[in-house]
Amino acid sequence: EPEIVSGPAADPDCFAPWSPETKFFKFQKKEGPYRIALANGYIANTWRIQMIQTAKAYAAQPDVAAKLKEFKVVSTGEDVPAQISAINNFIDSGYDAIVVNAQNPTAFGPVIKRAKEAGVVLVAFDNILDTEDAINVNVDQKGLGVLWANWLAKHLPEGGKILEVRGVAGTSVDTDRHNGIHETLAATGKKWDVVEVLGKWDDPTAQKATADAIAVHKKFDGITAQGGDTGVVQAMIDAGHPFVPFGGETENGFRKFCAKHAAEGLKCSSAGTGPAQVAVAIKTAIAALEGEVVPQSIKLPLAIVEDPNFKEGQDYYPDQSDNFFVGNAFPTCDINFTAQEIMGQSKENQ
Amino acid sequence: MAERDTPTVLFRMEGVSKRYGGVRALENAELAVTAGRIHAILGENGAGKSTLIKIMAGVVAPDDGRMLLDGQEVAFRSPAEAAAAGIACVFQELSLIPDLSVADNIVIANPPCRFGMIDRRAQRAIAEEALARAGADDIHPRAAVKDLPLSRRQLVEIAKALVSKPRILILDEATSALTAGDVAKVFAVLKRLRSEGLALLYISHRMHEITELADTCTVFRNGRNVASFKAGTRSSSEVVEMMIGREYSNVFPPKPKRIAAAGKPVLECRSLGWSDRLRDISLTVGEGEVVGLGGLEGQGQRQLLLALFGVLRGTTGSLLIDGTPATVRSPATARGAHNAMALIPEDRKTEGLMLPMTVRENLSFAALDRVSRGGIIDRNKEEQLIDEMVRLLAIKTAGLDIQVGALSGGNQQKVVIAKWLMRKPRIILLNDPTRGIDVGTKQELYQLLRRLAETGAAILFYSTDYDELIGCCDRVLVFYDGRIVRELEGDEITEHALIASALNVEEGKGTAA
Amino acid sequence: MSEASEDHLSFRARLPGFLRRMEPAVLTAFGCILLLLFLGSLYSSNFLSPDYLLQQMKVASFLGVVAAGMMVVILLGHIDLSVPWVMTMGAMMACAVAGFGEAGPVIAIPAGVFCGASFGLLNGVGVAYLRIPSMIVTLATNVVAQGLMVVYTGGFSPQDSASPAMRWLATGAIIPGLPNAILVWIAISAAMIFLFTRTSYGRAVYGIGNSERAAYLSGVDTRRVVMIAFAISGALSAFGGVLLAGYASKAAQAMGDAYLLPAIAAVVLGGTSILGGRGSYLGTVAGVVLITLLQSILSVMQMPEAGRQIVYGAVIIVMLLLYGRAPPDR
Amino acid sequence: MSEWRYWLNEQRGTLIGLAIFLMMFSVYIANHPAGLTANVAQTAANKGALLAFVAMAQALVVITAGIDLSVGMIFVLTNCLASWIVVGAPMPTALGVGAVLLTGMVCGAINGLLVIYGRLQPIVATIATGAVYFGLALLLRPFPGGSVNEELADALTGRLFGVVPSSLVALTAVVFLVWLPFRRSKIGRAAYAAGSSEPAAFMSGVPIRRGKFAAYTLAGLLAGMGGLFLTFFTYTGEAAYASGSAYTLWSIAAVVLGGVSLYGGRGSAIGAIFGAFAARTTGDMLFVFDVDPLWQPLLQGIVLMIAVSIGSLALLRVRNRLDWFR
Ligand SMILES: Nc1ncnc2c1ncn2[C@@H]1O[C@H](COP(=O)(O)OP(=O)(O)OP(=O)(O)O)[C@@H](O)[C@H]1O
Ligand SMILES: Nc1ncnc2c1ncn2[C@@H]1O[C@H](COP(=O)(O)OP(=O)(O)OP(=O)(O)O)[C@@H](O)[C@H]1O
Ligand SMILES: [Mg+2]
Ligand SMILES: [Mg+2]
């Protein structure tokens, strides 16, 4: 049972509260080293794989490793109940803290209750939990939509025809970003014609959807895509669509394009939070176990790079995979992974 | 010509027709069924017999005509309705459900229920009684039907038909898979049922069965009834002529006088064994020889053919072909260039043919390697070989591009044989090839066999019909419990000898009806 | 009943020769394509523009290649559920090999296809030799393939951009205006038609689909035929993945997920019996075009995902009811 | 053969399923840090029960020689529906439960109608209806949320007398109230007969259509129970496509592990339950063994592969190669 205290948090720069109303937790200090588990859901996409690599890399950093007795990762697939059961099992097996990338924000009520009773620290990140009883490491998904919409509004002061490539229907991330975009555009009072297609955060799917939209609508004035952005740009190139302002995610491939075609009109805003946020979640879990004050809801800074600031080797890596998610630095948390560190980690393990 | 109806006509069919696409399966068929009689229905393959009774049993809807039961017009929309009206049927294609138990199957149409659940105790009692009535009380009611041999299944099928206490019982070639012993049991049952006042409809291609059982006969040809008459008023050759519509001469071709050691041995096996179904089988088949396999049903004859054809695993002993040792691991090696074997399988519908494929595709299927080069089919060559075969076997078909399933049973069987003859096999294994085939076709088949033998093929011929073994074979090996117990040659091959050795008794009258 | 079929016959008799030879299911499928385009053109005339149609054909060619492999397997009465990750594997392996030294770009595509074929072979061994139902074997190999790709991506910092050859194959155009992907599809289609109609292998496939027992007793090595069919399916899935990677200019996890159900649906909408033994390749082509167009038109019309799923499902049901029904019992 | 040998023969598939499950589960428990505590059992039971419901549904259809690729989507649809209407006072909750189950049945019945009266092949027909059901789920829950009567939910996912997982009790009750009556009724036998050999069943005057229709409809009902249970387990509804298809695919694996023949006519829903629990345990294995996280999916695939290959051991006993072809 954490004590509810008033802020600020122990490391106020890193553990920034989500809003002024955010509560602060102070857990009973436990003696280290700790047993920490990561309950992941789906694994077979690049983001999740990179996330797990990062988690392993972070847990292996000497100062972190010194505090950990055990760091265990289990991926349970798409099935929410399986993930809930995994967390239950971690609780029953006496883990001190559980970090979770939840498949569904609303489904974990009972297990949160159990964690609380058992005195286990539960930290959610990426897809967070709809609760005040666990720690959430939040990405401002709606804010991301707002950011992209503002970027488009800035470049298209007169409004215009926008292609919005959405993610996976029925997920909260997709809905939040979508709402952020539309509310912001509506607030400008300009005339916007938004064509929505479904890209499923997947390059080929997004590319196909974009190609179809271009073939039928011929010309868009701006594009925003919440994933699969490399494919979207590829479709523009293949269709000979002129480059237009683009608000998108942080894929390496997308940023490569942005850097290369900026002069031709591909003015990008590339923002998001890379898989490295798992490190912040682990750091939070350790801080909580050490009895330090942490906010119930932490606001992660967005890693934003906007035209014309794309720097090779820092904002994007020409020799790395297109699928690689850039934006792995959280300087306020002393977390700063380079691509090499993340992808190289397990090579030594091999 | 037709016998006038007696007043106790139970069921009558008038002007019933049925077409399948372009085929007229039944045209203006008439039938009158009387209680307490056994009605035989005769006709060559494709005459429409099965179609007729399928209509009676509600399996197939007629295009035209009407049916009267007790003078009331009836129309059955399903077998269940027909059963409710007192018409039960043992179909040519078995209608047992393989995964259910014998008892489940026997009561399938109307299981006994208590509180909405099936009462398994009652079911078992019913099943045991029905099995006893069908003379099959050795079958365990709880055994799964798929584990029973074909002949046992036929008995279960009859037991099942009896459960509904039918007034009309139809048997469509119900005895074609039965051994003589089982046939005798069935006949006893049928005669008892007749005396209980049932009307029985009996379809069979075995003339002697008809002679023994039938009270009245109706002959069909090309979907029409050609004659109805009291049994015994026509000689069997007259009947056969009515069926095939032409002169009927000697069924079996003359056997050549056998010289002591016929041709040189083509197929030899030495102490062949497999599981406990084949024990120490040694045999030789020479060039130009037709060797029969006799004995009761299920004594290992089929297994021997399968073993020779490479289907069985774990056979022991050795096999010699043309005097050199050979290993046959699969039908593919068996039919291969050196071994040149062919097997006419037991069940043409599932093992011999691909029913939905065309006649052409079926005919060339086993010989594709002969008509193709590098895996690519030479269509001209294929066409040429097929034409030759269709002519050789006089296959009656509306065309080469119709589904083989639309042919009548006999013509289907011809297709099976033709598809193997296309390979010009030197060793031909026949697994009861005349089951359910009319006399006309049978006759053609016997002649064909003899011709093949004359061209030097070695033929191993299993048949459940003793007449065939007697009429066709140069030698007969009689099986009992997986062994060859007797070898009969030349004039020794008589019904008496066959039956006696099949029962593995030295002398004394057999049980043949 | 018989009257109706005669009417039908006489109607068909009046059609031009090449149409008469086509099966009714194939004809209906092509009819549905025209209807779909007509309905689309009511929304926007751009649905009939050559640009749009070529774009659709290009995209359809990926599905077409996968569906061709699926069809071989379905004709045997089996099914291949390992398509998603075998596709992904083909794509990723081709990209990986492309980055592998001098020879890499040359052998990239064959290497990807080879990986797919080997996985198909694994399916084939399971189905033909171990006689596990294909639905189960391929389900399991799909999970295994996924596992391999996760390990691979996580452990080897993979090279996953498509080689120029892959790009060219999917998006280039030897004949100006006609994407190569379409030519590839045409070439594979020609090969499939030849395989099905002119080779003994094709006959064996149909034969086994109708009755494996009869085919075996006819001396066909049925197990080998089945195994090869799965290898073909695996190879074509992987090749589809290679093309898709060329189109997207890179390989990515889970890129094949969207291809399994459409591939099955395309084959079946084209009149192939899911029980095996019946079906013609042209039907599969029609099915592929139909599915691709349907998805695309729904997408461009901006129907929300919920409505799109409902319409997609309903259209498939209606079309099957039109011509995909089994014959009546009696 | 004596009576019990016949019984053994009839139940072989189910018993093999049970054996596989027991084997895997004991390995799991032996390596679990907490051992077999009430909590661990409850967790395993809840998770297994969900798949068990869906697998039972699948088994019913598979027995008729069909397949239902929409079970997962019915499961998702009923979950979304339940998250709207299974709330509030006992009375509305009960009505809600009734409506959810009815919805499941209707979905199953639609499948049945299409397959039986529409004469469509089950594989494709249910792929298509699955898309429709998922679309409806998405209409109900464009994003995750909703709620459920939590007392009821806790009661059904908790423990009875502090030890017995109530989900297992519920599952057993369903076996007795739905499966066994079906299995022992005329309709149930018709379903088996139709699955084993449809032409033979037709010729024997078995009510094939009614039997198959009942099987599809009850399958919908069972999938609906699964969806309801999912709602109890998660307190919310979510239209998750991936999870729907995962349940569909795993239900097929479960059915096969539980000894139900995909060719129809053989096996029982009880076997499917064991199969479901066995399939779930393959996932749990990764939890107790220290496997590199990236290797886990591969390992699970291999375990699944081995589990489904067990059945092919019987092949070694086949001495007549014709038996290969059913
Ligand atoms: N389902 C069907 N489809 C097409 N044609 C059929 C079908 N059933 C029967 N026929 C045709 O109808 C005719 C009569 O067939 P039927 O089975 O009644 O003959 P049969 O007298 O029973 O012959 P057999 O003695 O060979 O069993 C045959 O020409 C057959 O090809
Ligand atoms: N499928 C069957 N076929 C034939 N006989 C059966 C079948 N099932 C049960 N019987 C027999 O029917 C009688 C009563 O069956 P009942 O089901 O009451 O026995 P049981 O011991 O409860 O069987 P189970 O445990 O399998 O349910 C027994 O004599 C049994 O052998
Ligand atoms: Mg007949
Ligand atoms: Mg009992």
Image (cartoon, rainbow, N blue to C red):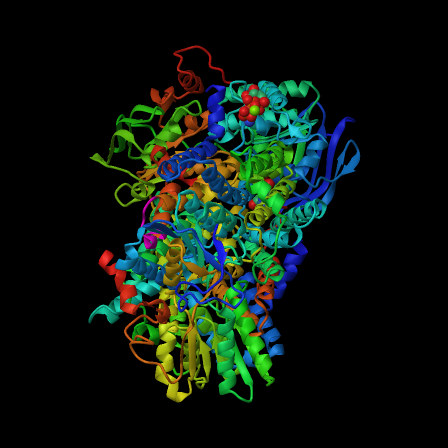
Q: Residue C213, position in %: x, y?
A: 42, 42
Q: Is residue C101 visible?
A: yes
Residue B421 inside the magenta-drawn segment: no
Q: Residue D37, position in %: x, y?
A: 44, 36
Q: Is residue B349 visible?
A: no
User: In terms of depth relative to the viewer, which is nearer, C276 or D54?
Assistant: D54
Q: Name above or below for residue C289 compared with residue D291.
A: below
Residue D290 inside the magenta-drawn segment: yes
| Residue that appears at 34% across and 65% down | C91
Ligand 1 quadrant in view:
top right
Q: Quadrant of residue B279?
A: top left
As drawn, is C155 to the left or to the right of D105?
A: left
Q: Name above or below for residue C15 compared with residue A160.
A: above
Image mark count: 0
As drawn, is C194 to the left or to the right of C327?
A: left
Q: Residue D20, position in %: x, y?
A: 41, 36
Q: Quadrant of residue D205?
A: top right
Q: What stretch of residues is rendered in magenta?
A: D289-297
Q: Residue D198, position in %: x, y?
A: 57, 41
As drawn, is C23 to the left or to the right of B456?
A: right
Q: Quadrant of residue B211?
A: top right
